Image (tube, grey):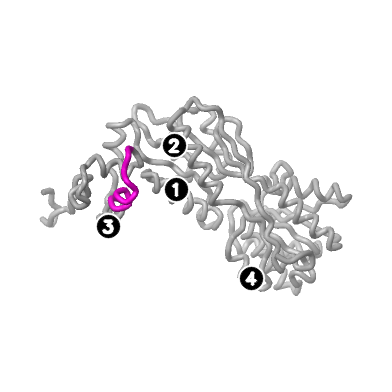
């Protein structure tokens, strides 16, 4: 047995045969149970997977790639995990991926993606799920051999995509604030792109305001990297200089929470002075005082559909392009209490 430099034995890598002996089944049954292939009784599959978890079994992806031309690895491209939306999405995606016997690999840098798509002779990953990551996804335009599915608010014409359609919910939120008699309903964003009307939230907000013959007011705090302290300070400075809107739609829930703190610190009350709504559907929005309204994105459904799309694409690369649009849902809480109740 190989030894460490201090002379102690290295731990033995757990193999499929080790699991098979404990489970009392054939090695191929273990392989099928872990990889979701073949015909394995549900009770046997769960027994094998439980033993694998208890033994801390780590698949030999290199061997799998050599024998099957597959690695069993799915790359997840995502934004910063200090933003709960991305962290929640990764959590749900990992669950779906692992349940089917694949291994999720988190990747965030352009260089890492270029390494994937430029791999020659070796298969780096079996497929990719990209959550937003607009510029990085463009790399797959010239490398269509790597199966890729995107999740986000934008339709991509060259890959399979799952689209969060927030337009109806944004329109509903803005119309509710206007119907409550609010005169100055604004949209709060943190970057140039998110403040442009090509983006669904900003675009739907602006169109709804114009339809009501009200001038849109898009506030861009110009903070591409999420930093709560910076966002709060910049919004307070904006309020001090330009006064306070009486209705506020925020780019996402993090921004809504920062805006809420900034408003309170300057003596404004939600919902009496300002109606407030965020976007994404984070659970802890409900625990503020007052509870904050949000437009919930269907993260569970988007993840499940994206994974199904990717499995089909990996099985049959010739499939027509797959696309699904899934609507968001406005959750009206006390921060919109002047309008309605949840």
257 to the left or right of 211: left
Q: Would you say the magenta stretch is mainly helix, strand or loop?
A: helix
Compute the Cα span from label 1 to label 2.
Answer: 14 Å
- List the residue tagged with mark 4: 288
In the image, residue 164 lies at what x, y percent?
Answer: 62, 46
Circle 4/circle 3 CB separation < 8 Å: no
255 to the left or right of 117: right
Residue drawn at x 71%, y 41% as measured from the top left: 198
* Crowding near the residue tagged with mark 3, few <14, some 14–19, many ≥20 C-alpha atoms within 10 Å: few
Q: Which mark is residue 127?
A: 2
Q: Nearer the viewer, residue 154 or 220?
A: 154
Compute the Cα span from label 4 to label 3.
Answer: 40 Å
Of pointers 1 and 2, the one earlier in the residue sequence:
1
In the image, residue 36 lies at what x, y percent?
Answer: 36, 42
Of pointers 4 and 3, the one earlier in the residue sequence:
3
Q: Which mark is residue 54?
A: 3
Q: Is residue 42 magenta?
A: yes
- Describe the element under mark 3 as helix, strand or loop: helix
Quadrant location of the C terminus in the rendered image:
bottom right
Q: Nearer the viewer, residue 114 or 301?
A: 301
Extent of the magenta region: 38-48
């Amino acid at each position: 047995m190989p030894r460490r430099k201090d002379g102690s034995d290295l731990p033995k890598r757990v193999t499929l045969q080790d699991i098979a002996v404990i489970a009392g089944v054939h090695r191929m049954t273990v392989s099928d149970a872990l990889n979701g292939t073949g015909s394995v009784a549900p009770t046997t599959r769960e027994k094998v997977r439980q033993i694998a978890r208890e033994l801390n079994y780590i698949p030999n992806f290199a061997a799998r790639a050599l024998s099957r031309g597959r690695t069993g690895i799915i790359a997840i491209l995502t934004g910063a995990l200090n933003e709960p939306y991305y962290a929640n999405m990764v959590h749900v995606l990992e669950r779906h991926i692992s349940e089917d016997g694949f291994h999720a690999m988190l990747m965030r840098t352009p260089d890492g993606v270029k390494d994937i798509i430029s791999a020659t002779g070796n298969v780096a990953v079996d497929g990719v799920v990209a959550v937003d990551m607009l510029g990085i996804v463009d790399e797959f335009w010239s490398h269509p051999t790597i199966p890729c599915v995107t999740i986000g608010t934008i339709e991509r014409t060259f890959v399979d995509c799952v689209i969060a359609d927030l337009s109806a919910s944004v329109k509903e939120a803005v119309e509710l604030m206007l119907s409550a008699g609010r005169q100055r309903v604004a949209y709060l964003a943190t970057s140039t792109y998110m403040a442009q009307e090509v983006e669904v939230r900003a675009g739907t907000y602006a169109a709804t305001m114009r339809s009501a013959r009200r001038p849109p007011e898009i506030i861009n705090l110009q903070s591409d990297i999420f930093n709560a302290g910076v966002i709060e300070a910049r919004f307070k400075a904006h309020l001090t200089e330009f006064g306070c809107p009486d209705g506020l739609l925020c780019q996402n829930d993090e921004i809504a929470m920062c805006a809420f703190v900034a408003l309170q610190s300057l003596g404004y009350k939600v919902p009496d002075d300002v109606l407030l709504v965020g976007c994404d559907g984070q659970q802890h929005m409900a625990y503020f005082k007052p509870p904050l309204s949000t437009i919930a994105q269907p993260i569970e459904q988007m993840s499940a559909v994206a994974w199904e799309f990717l499995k089909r694409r990996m099985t049959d690369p010739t499939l027509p392009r797959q696309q699904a649009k899934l609507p968001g849902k406005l959750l009206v809480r006390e921060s919109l209490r002047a309008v309605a109740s949840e």
